[in-house]
Amino acid sequence: MIIRTDFPYGTTHEDVRIPLPDGVELYARIWRPVTDEPVPALLEYLPYRLTDWTAPRDQQRHPWYAGHGYASVRVDVRGHGCSGGRPGDEYDARELADGVAVVEWLAAQPWCTGSVGMFGISWGGFNSLQIAALAPEPLKAIVTVCSTDDRYDNDVHYMGGSVLAVDMHAWAATMLAFASRPPDPRFVGDDWRRQWLDRLEAVEPLVHTWLSHQTRDAYWRHGSVCEDYTAVRAAVLAVGGWHDPYRDTVLRLVEHLPSARVRGLIGPWSHQYPDRGLPPGPAIGFLQETLRWWDHWLKGADNGVMDEPLLRTWISDSHPPATVYDELPGRWVGEKAWPSASVIPVPYVFQGAPVDVASPQHTGLDAGRFFPFGNDADLPPDQREEDAKSACFEFPVGREEPVEILGRPSVTLRLRLDVPYGQVIARLCDVAPDGSSTLVTRGALNLSARRGRDRALPWPVGSYEDVTFELNGIGHAFAPGHRIRLAVSSAYWPWIWPRAGSEVGWTLDPAGSALTLPVRAGSAADGGIVFEAPEQAEPLGVVFPATLDEPRPERLVVRDVARGTWRLEVDPRYGGTRVFPDGLEYSEDAEEVYEIQDADALSARTFSRWRIRLHRPELGWDARVETRSEIRCDEGGFLTSNEVVCREGDEVVFHRTWERRLPRAAG
């Protein structure tokens, strides 16, 4: 990583409050170049607290943009951080309307040219894309990283029509804790406590809403740009990583947006900005790449950025299974159009007699983390244990040439069920000559969603039907002498929440089943794709105190032999304890538990606990948040339990519990 200290412009920064039409003010930090000339503005808009939680990351990029002639602005969403108002649902209409108002406010400032860009990763990438679909006139371009255009079928709540147990639960629990954090008195003054208590009165576990909408309905269509791509008028640079769950959005955006104002970039990365150097690499000079985008669309520079291939992507070579890679082997390739004429669907037809598949309920414990962040235990280990619980179909790779794929594989399966409900999970693996099995990509289908995600249709018991579904997109080259393995299972815990009765599985008839791979033959746009080395502004100088405590394992599997129970214990490793240069001591600790018994879908249980402390010794300020979240399920519905306890010092200032029963209509 190159740390940049000299820039074309000197920089300055200030904290301001941006007024909204209803009188609420949003807290903002603005870095600007030292110049008398107006400049374009760049906006990053998040609920994650600019004064502490994202401050280290903000310091890496906002001053860098300011040093290159942009006003770079970080704003906290209403009801979060030091902004006024009460928190709401993610990406709700108020959040997006507030975002439009901020864009218009920035454009109207005397130091702004009137041209605005938006950027962000994850939440900030989501609302950049969603606000672009509202088309405020000043918004000329966005950079959306690790985001989605489909809030139902490509987010943290549902996968293939099934409840995504691992992140439906974990993200709802995380946001319950995050929304309960107080404003900081150093920035809001003595009114912090009143604001905190008012904010807490509005906090509601988001899982109540998410589990109340188990099919694709109007709730999920809101904010899903895939409903109308023509609404997006701004230029879009869409960025993802092959180890990020949102990567398919990049493929859809470059397919559906006009090629004159969209470009896509997919690297080997996890759910991180591509310049941070977190596994898997290689990292790139992402800030420089985005600067080219801003200079073209916000300053009118003729810099060749639109001469790049429509889609630039990394294709990984075969590699042994591991839970972390510093860098993956492979190369950059380019496609001038998407779908690409150089990518041809090639069917691989199954062979053999019908096979009964009733996977143990703990199949999926080696799935890895749904959101890899670059930690040591994020990625799936050797898949041989999972493959042994699945029906496997193999296809040899010739001895001379690799089989290179780019895009979304698909499977067609002829299935018979003897119960009305079930799910099917397909994993594509690269099997080396030594037998090791590396997960390449995967997909899932709730069989009640086989006719569409907007409905739930029971299976006609005792009948065969053909179902087809896509796996997540990938760029991968299967090496000569390896085997392509498709492993199909009827369970995948804790990713897919099972339905009562689905333990019996289903019968798969190979005669009507096939895997279709997007085989790539090469492209004239492959050559010459290079990126600069990553660089950032000077770091913030946050201190991470050493601790005598032995860290918990990131992912620990525990088997209770007598009960037949499997338990996955997860430490998400979000940040631990850190001390900021302004004196704030910020601590957080989270743990997640996913539990299931071998032959009982109704034994599935998720549990999370969060502890957060914000402490300013010089102000005598000590605020603590503790939350507990749990989900269970019976034949009729989901049972959720949530608790929030907030303290100022040793005094409990807020305590609330929620118990809900939410009917299981689908999911």
Image (cartoon, helix red, strand yellow):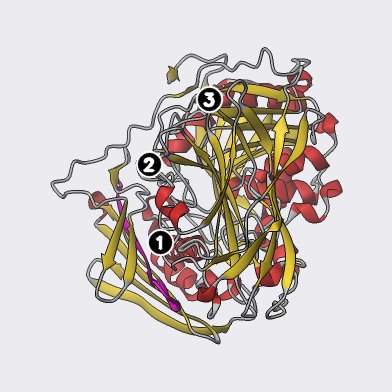
The Cα–Cα distance between marks 3 and 2, rounded to whole angstroms, is 26 Å
Q: Is residue 81 above or below residue 343?
A: below
226 to the left or right of 357: right
Q: Label 3's element?
A: helix
Foreground: 290 or 269? 269
Q: Main secondary structure of the magenta part?
A: strand
Please state the horizontal and vertical placement of residue 636, each as a whole percent of the image: 55, 87
Q: Label 2's element?
A: loop
Q: Quadrant of the C terminus?
A: bottom right
Q: Is residue 506 above or below residue 140?
A: below
Q: Label 1's element?
A: loop
Q: Which residue was labeled with disc 3? A: 64
Please state the horizontal and vertical placement of residue 134, each as a whole percent of the image: 79, 51
Please state the horizontal and vertical placement of residue 95, each as a whole percent of the image: 65, 58
The magenta region covers 583-605
Q: Which residue was labeled with disc 1? A: 182
Question: Few, some or many C-alpha atoms within 10 Å of disc 2 (few <14, some 14-19, many ≥20)?
Answer: some
| Residue 531 magenta-highlighted | no
Question: Few, some or many C-alpha atoms within 10 Å of disc 1 (few <14, some 14-19, many ≥20)?
Answer: many
Q: Which residue was labeled with disc 2? A: 375
Please state the horizontal and vertical placement of residue 238, each as a whole percent of the image: 68, 37
